[in-house]
Amino acid sequence: MTGHDHESRIGELLNRMTVEEKFGQLQQLAWAWDTGPGGGDTEAAEAAARKGLLGSVLNVVGAGASNALQRIAVEESRLGIPLVFGLDVIHGYHTTFPVPLAQAAAFDPAVTAKDAEVSAREARSNGVHWTFSPMMDVTREPRWGRIAESTGEDPYLTTAYAMAKVRGYQGDDLTAPDRIAACAKHFVAYGGAEGGRDYNTVDVSEQRLRNLYLPPFRAAVGAGAATVMAGFNTISGIPAHAHPHTLTDILKEEWGFDGVVVSDWTGVLELIAHGAAAHEAEAARRSLTAGVDMEMVSTTFADHGRDLLASGALTRERLDDAVARVLRLKLRLGLFESPYVAESAALTAPSAESRAAAREVAGRCVVLLKNDDGLLPLDTSGPRALAVVGPFADSGDLLGTWTLPGAPEAVPVLAGLRAALPDTDIRHAAGVSPEGLDTSGIAEAVAVAEAADAVVLVVGEPPALSGEAAARSELGLPGAQEQLVRAVAGTGTPCVVVLVGGRPLTIGTWADRVPAIVMAWHPGIEAGHAVADVLTGAVVPGGKLPVTFPRTVGQVPLYHNHERTGRPYDPAAPGTKYVSRYLDLDAGPEFVFGHGLSYTTFALDEPRLSRERIGVTELRAGATVEVAVPVRNTGGREGDEVVQLYLQDPAATIAQPVRRLCGFRRVRLAPGEERQVRFTLGADDIGYWTDDPAGEFIVEPGELHLHTGNSSRTRARRTLLIT
């Protein structure tokens, strides 16, 4: 069915629908986990579907359950309009991939596209049409638990991942049996939550909104994202669910978005708690008129819509627009023609192919933070004794936040190493629990470490400590884990620390005591095998940090693309007092954005420009500048390097960041191999948005400095003159 046919069908349905049925299409209700029709709190959904007063349901799990409820809507309601089923498929359905922050560490959008493709295939076969993903909230706040769902602190990196995941979920045809509708969330600036406390306020200027938070959403809309979800936060005093400037002026009018804007869970009702509405009817009015089209879980639209319409507080045009958007989504998904799924074809478990994909992706996400004296990869040349200790060494709790009920546990690191090193004497001791303070087991862990030739110490934070509503005021290892690290490191046995978690952790109190540190994140279902692949050298690590690791939580927020100050700290003059620094802490982070080591070495030569000057008028007309960076593998092993390009604007109308990422490319090189990595810069890369509420994007004349390197601590520079 063509787009024109869709609009004709939408017009026909709107003419036939009652006011109650229209508001019903704007309602999404929640389904109880693990229950079918007639069970628990599903009765309200069934009754509404039977009356044609329901547009969507979330949390229906299984082909049988979705088909049963769909039959009620299609075969028993007056107009037979199908339901659209939504679910939080964040980084896997049956096959759990690494958390999104880990995927960002691959600096390879293909990994997130692979996650989305596998997830869409598994989810659609089970009756799910719509995922509430990707989350593209740029965040500089490691205390915020939902940083695990993000792709980190950089808008350019997040934009690349947002486009890849949208396309991975949706493909070219949403009616296909292996595709689902994506949802760009949370619109907008949710990642700036004050103090890292979830659901908190965000006070943001127009230029920061447009330069930092909006670019990934604009790209997702350009990539065809079918839906957008409003954020829980306020934006400079106005809740995102009642923010017409972002939801309507920018998203729908400026960008031309014709899909569905859905609320977050009870986000409309929460306008009352925000102090932005006195009662439910006012919450419904503010949210609907601002641009929200569908209400998740709470029922203020359906309960008060008729009265709002009768009083003139809500126009029929706005109501019909919202309903049309919901119907358009269902038509694009092909639900009118194919409302049911084949239950016999439902995928009920990970396949060997999907597990292999998850393992490969997890290996690409690992970041080698430190590797003194080349301790890694582990020596696998002959039998030896290896101690595998720590609270997460033999744990399957490595899937990360936002995994679905019934998802298989992760392969433990201990099991992965035993499979990879069958001839090695591997001994295990937990030492401590993930969060407990009992240290009585440390003595056993020390004894195991002392009797070994090397130690793999697996520590970090459990998935329960990251994700939604999981803010932390401290970022160190929970419980007694730091005591375990110090004790094991004190044995003198060469020690590799494998960090697991969903956020940057402060490790400065013990990082210098161990020779090697690997950031494995929450690696997903194939965790143990993927970690073993990296530790043994079967996979050469090539990941980079998508977020800055602070030395202490007191440095937060700390990020690579910060604005300059009039009194910057100069490392060459450490005794200077009146500069921007802490008195009690060395300047800079523990590990910078873009950092990551390898088992081989690389050399990057100075960048070469296709032209050294270009006019503003040329850029606005579409002209570009090519930047070529020669990179060669100077070591003895094949490996991956991420070549990174940063732009610095030393003098602008609005002070620009010290540098901003404007290109990256992950390349694999054999020993001695050299390659030219090429980037193309145009007006979108060079210009920036001003603080004009109407939205003004400018490209200014002047010098631009282009920096290249393998982290945000770049080493080479060229100057481009804009005339």
Image: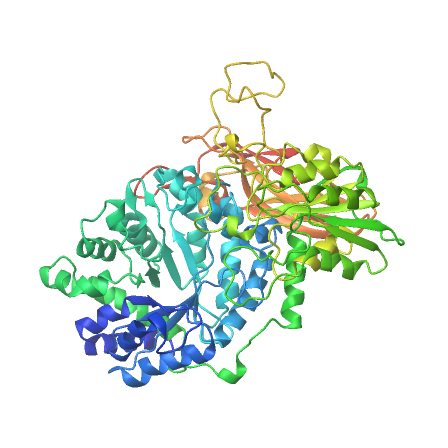
Residue at figure coordinates x 27%, y 74% from the top left: 48
**Position of residue 124 measured from the top left corner of the image (x, y, whole percent):** 48, 73
- Residue extending farthest to the front is 440
Residue at figure coordinates x 70%, y 54% from the top left: 531
**Position of residue 303 measured from the top left corner of the image (x, y, whole percent):** 19, 64
- Residue 102 in view of the camera: yes
In the rendered structure, the answer to whether residue 307 lies left or right of residue 670 reads: left
Which of these two is toward me, 34 or 66? 34
Which of these two is toward me, 26 or 526? 526
For residue 603, above or below residue 59: above
In the rendered structure, the answer to whether residue 486 lies left or right of residue 47 reads: right
Residue at figure coordinates x 75%, y 41% from the top left: 446
- Residue extending farthest to the left is 311
- Residue 682 in view of the camera: no
Q: How many marks?
A: 0
**Position of residue 220 measured from the top left corner of the image (x, y, whole percent):** 45, 57
Which of these two is toward me, 34 or 50? 34
**Position of residue 688 measured from the top left corner of the image (x, y, whole percent):** 43, 40
What colour scheme has been applied to the protein in the rendered image?
A: rainbow
For residue 659, above or below residue 325: above
In the rendered structure, the answer to whether residue 81 lies left or right of residue 86 reads: left
Query: Where's the N terminus, which quadrant?
Result: bottom left
